[in-house]
Amino acid sequence: MKGIAALYYDGRTPLRQPAELLVIGDEIIGRGQFGERRARRTEVEISEPMGRSPRFVRFGDGGTFEVADLDGFARWLTAAGFSDSPVVRMQKRWSWALGSLFGAGVLIAAIYVWGLPAFSKLLAPRIPEPVLQALSEQTLSFLDDKLLAPSRLSEARRAELTVYADKILRAGTDLPAHRLHFRSAALGPNAFALPSGDIVVFDQLVELASSDDEVAGVIAHELGHVAHRHGVRQLIQSSLVSFVVGIYFGDVSSLAGSLGALALESRYSREFELEADAYAARTMIAAGRGSEPLAVMLESMEKAHSGKGAGTARWDVLSTHPDTAERVGRLRAMR
Amino acid sequence: MEALAANYYEILGVGQEATLDEIKAAYARQLAAFRDMLVQREPAAAEKLVALREAFKVLGNPEARVAYDASMDGAPPASVPPAAAAGVADQSAGEREEKFQFVGDGSEYFRIWIVNVFLSIVTIGIYSAWAKVRREQYFHRNLMLDGSGFDYHGKPMAILKGRIVAVLLLGGLSAAQHFSPLAYGVAILCLLPVVPWLAVKAFRFRAHNTSYRGLRFSFHGTYGQAFKVFIGYGLLALVTFWLAFPVFYRQVRKFILDNTRFGTTAFDCSVTTGAIYRIFLFPGFIILALFIAMVIVIGMTAAGGTGALAAAGFIVLLIPLLVIVPQMVIVPYIAARTTNAVWSATRLGSHRFFSRLPVGGYIGLTVVNWLGIIFTLGLFIPWARVRVARFRAEYIALEVDGSLDAFVAGEAGTATALGDEAAEMFDLDIGL
């Protein structure tokens, strides 16, 4: 078999020495003015083809042969019985590249849609309670500083609502620990739950409701988020997304990462809402109040928010939930 | 001391009538002898090398040789046929400029990149270590100088180990950031003294795993030096409200370059603080102006009244500007000019680097890359990387003094990948 021209570097100086590479039996032989180098074919490392760059045949002690004639070297390797690794063959073909692109797209979508929620559901119950407490306290005190004002409802009214809601909630099964808070905010009629079980109801929601049952319905909905650990699951998902996005985009990380997190954090997903609705409906039905009060409340909240018109600052948790009409329909079907 | 008194012919051990080929052969022979001296740790080795280089620089160049011969007392000029010698002389003697050249191709790297992305996802990230090796190999081997490519020797298993530790570290940090700012603050404070250590590890790993013509690079910076640079000068930059940032920047670049060696020959970066300050002056003013505009607008919003709504709308416009302008214009402006300043002031032994990146062209390149990446949802990334590598290589050159053959390998060392991986995860910009 024919040899192939190469340049030899001894690994101790950058001196280029003309050489020839041969394969005889089980051995690779490089020879030139420097003499002869021999090694078993399994002991040399042959670099993968990378475009028009020269390829290397490396001996164990650092001696390296550099081959510039790429086509000739490919023929030489084939004749000597070497073959490319599967990954190299994939990298060479456009069909594999496009297949990988498609496969990567499908996998990312599948992980995002199924993998991530399943993982967060698995992990959420394992987050220790004190962590959730600390986290929720911070969030509430932050919101109190920036967005929320003390409730203007009378002490008696607040106590009355708390006792009433508590009576209804006790009728349900699977009741997590919870505390009820009242606040006033310029954000319209609304309510939200923190992972620790702290539920905050805005004065504006109490004022909008035509009965205490409607308020209790919303509180039951928020408690549904707590019972299903939606808040923690959301947090785990968004943390993971921003982490992965951050690594992928490298220098764009902080921006893309926080945008990814924002896209997820700002809203509970549709499934979460429907789950919380179902929880609320079960509780209200068990308490003998039916699902109608929550359905009515959702409709009036929708009306209240859309009535404010565009251009106003809107920060709402309930009204922009997907398809109020559909949720109301489902609630009424559960009656 | 004998060498100093001898004439160039005696140093090389040839007669005055020697042909150019004989002179080159003699020079190679003498270099080999010099290496033996070095191995036996003879103290005169360094002087001998200087004398050898000096002699070859003159005698290897036919024109200089004629002048030298004429200057020698009473000695007849050697009869060198100038026409025959000139062609070869260009290749091996005197000073010549060798351009770096990047021969990679975007669509070819795209195929490597996408196959590796796919395999990394399928293996839940484990394959990413192999993917990194392929990426580094692609960008090292396609970078050519004087007809030879660079090479990358990082081992996937080492990178995987480093990567796992770095992911755990960063994952823990980001979890702490979400769940408890206090724990996060404590963790960051504890990690601060670790940063110089990671940096040294990172530079060592990168240098150690890079080779050119079979000879490895190496890094010899110590933890003490790194602590002084990253923590000392870093804090200085912080307490002076970034006014001392150029000082910090220069220290970092000098720390990296001055401690990097090719074989036993060290890089030497003599860039001045003034040169770096001149570069940061203009971006400093722009960022200051944007900052002041921001403060005014926020003040108006806080003051309330009719102006508040307009100001709030203005913030929405201003924030993208604050992100996009620095990323698309200021970052490449600084990158191009600092690359030029630092590399043009850098030597490797007697060889000098030159960098002449055109600032406008580099900004244009960056803007196109960003738009490409955004509008293709990241698929343009491989082309963008190749474009940057090609552009930088095109404008950076090495002025070779004599020949590139006269380097000698240093002691082989080992390096772990943890620092490099951590640096990559934490977005530490330590690229040269």
Image (tube, coloured by chain):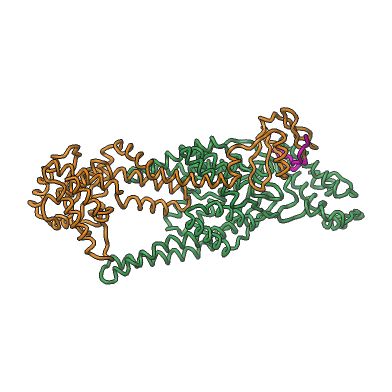
Image hue for chain A: orange
Q: Nearer the viewer, residue B153 or B429?
A: B153
Q: Nearer the viewer, residue A173 or A158?
A: A173
Task: Tell me which residue sits at (14%, 48%) in the image.
Answer: A216
- Give coordinates of residue B280: x percent, y percent: 51, 61
**Residue B180 seen by the camera:** no
Which quarter of the rendering shows the N terminus of chain B? top right
Which span of residues is magenta-colored? A1-18
Task: Tell me which residue sits at (65%, 45%) in the image.
Answer: B150
Quarter occupied by residue A18: top right
Residue located farthest toward the front when viewing the structure as drawn: A333
**Does the magenta-highlighted stretch encompass residue A158?**
no
- Give coordinates of residue A102: x percent, y percent: 49, 46
Marks counted in the figure total 0
Above or below — where is A174 with respect to B234?
above
- Give coordinates of residue A137: x percent, y percent: 24, 46
Above or below — where is B403 with respect to B168?
below
**Does the magenta-highlighted stretch encompass residue A5?**
yes
Task: Tell me which residue sits at (29%, 68%) in the image.
Answer: B309
Quarter occupied by residue B47: top right
- Give coordinates of residue B314: x percent, y percent: 35, 67
Residue A226 horizontal side relative to residue B397, left or right: left
Residue B149 horizontal side relative to residue B129, left or right: right
Above or below — where is A41 with respect to B133?
above
Residue A174 horizontal side relative to residue B75, left or right: left
**Residue A148 seen by the camera:** yes
Image hue for chain B: green
Residue located farthest toward the bottom when viewing the structure as drawn: B306
Quarter occupied by residue A48: top right
Residue located farthest toward the left when viewing the structure as drawn: A156
Q: Nearer the viewer, residue B409 or A9?
A: A9
